[in-house]
Image: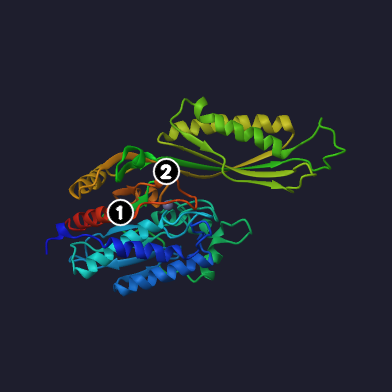
Amino acid sequence: MDVAKLRVNGKRLRGTLEEMAKIGATPAGGVQRLALSDEDKRARDLFVGWLKELSLEVSVDEMGNIFGRRAGRSNNLEPVMMGSHIDSQPRGGRFDGILGVMGALEVMRTLHENQVQTERPVIIVDWTNEEGSRFAPAMVSSGVWAGALERDWAYGRTDINGQKQGEELARIGYQGKLPAKKWPTHAYYEYHIEQGPMLERQGRTIGAPKGILCLHWYDVYLAGEANQVGPTPMEGRHDALVAAAEMILAVRALPARMGGNMVATVGEIQNYPNSRNIIPDRVHFTVDIRSWDDEHALKSWDLLKKDFQDIAARHGTPIEIDETWRVAHAPFDEKLVQRVLETAGQLGCSSLHMVSGAGHDASYMNQVCPTAMIFVPSIGGRSHVEVENTRWEDCEAGANVLLHCILKTAGEK
Ligand SMILES: [Zn+2]
């Protein structure tokens, strides 16, 4: 058989995505499949069943990462890996993460039904808790697997209700025995929606990011003094929420102040006791800073931290800061990125060389082996929202690019 003519089954891929989208479906057309929730478990069970239908060798490691291995001709050669994540944001979309896992599954199905034998083994993977919205940080399990994060630290991370990540992993039955420890890998591909507007704006189908921005996460805790809002004069208040508001504006102003080349966001805030007639005495909020230039991001943070301390002092609201998580920017393997662009061209797809502003498991995989990603357009550039959408033709096109990148890379001796 001429493998160059092989194509995935776009209709089957669509059916698979639609079936997955029922698990945790939200009324406005999105999904909510938080890491290690009951919905995550149901989606995993379905996925594992599909892997077994293809007679893949399925294993689950102690972080709940699910692997399906397809033997090659030379099983002593390092495998090629592909995958993404099944978990979602709260009220997230139907494509983020899951497209990369179901796209990889479609590649496996295509290889299987055409009885293609690759030189190297091929492994499909679902990484646990990529999103980090229930348990911070994000990409935690690829991080542990890659050796960048500690397993026990990851187990101890808690959600907003105080539940521990390790216990939730055990509760849903996905705390495997296999050590979450990298093995020698020939290459890793991650297929994903773009989550931004560039492909759509430029009318291109396939994006090949040259890498991922650095990602720095901080948690800020402020303490104020609660009191009845009526009788308490404005002078001398210690209002933690007002202090936080000033800090949030400082975050918003930071990129312009630094001359661009970065983004900075406060996305989450908890205010206590959150009552209209009590002065807030406790506030927690998050800061997210991203740039292609790690030093630039760190320098920005130093300035911002100083601002925060000044603001806190002025309001008499003591501040505590956790430097929760930092991932350096990840420049992908140039040869692999070129392969994505080339393959898109061979399949008749337009393409764009770009950067990824979103973090992905590929960031940690890039520390293990040559890595590249394949992007397809997000309609309206929207993601992490229920209206997140990608055209079915584009889903199919991206899966075909993945298929042929895998065929080439898994064919290398
Ligand atoms: Zn994702």
Q: Position of residue 376 (x, y in %)?
A: 33, 48
User: How many marks are shown on the rendered structure?
Assistant: 2
- Which of the labelled discs sits on residue 381, or is there none? 2
**Which quarter of the figure is the C terminus placed in?**
bottom left
Quarter of the image where the N terminus is located: bottom left
Q: Residues within 10 Å of mark 2 (few under 14, many from 20)?
A: some
Residue 277 is marked as none
Q: Residue at x 46, y 33 (%)?
A: 262
Identify residue for label 1. 393
Judged left or right of residue 345, residue 277 is right
Q: Amino acid at mark 2?
A: Gly
The structure residue drawn at horizontal position 32% and vertical position 48%, both measured from the top left corner, is 373
Is label 2's Cβ within 8 Å of ligand 1?
A: no
Q: Is residue 1 left or right of residue 67?
A: left
- Report helix, strand or loop for mark 2: helix
Q: Is residue 143 above or below residue 244?
A: below
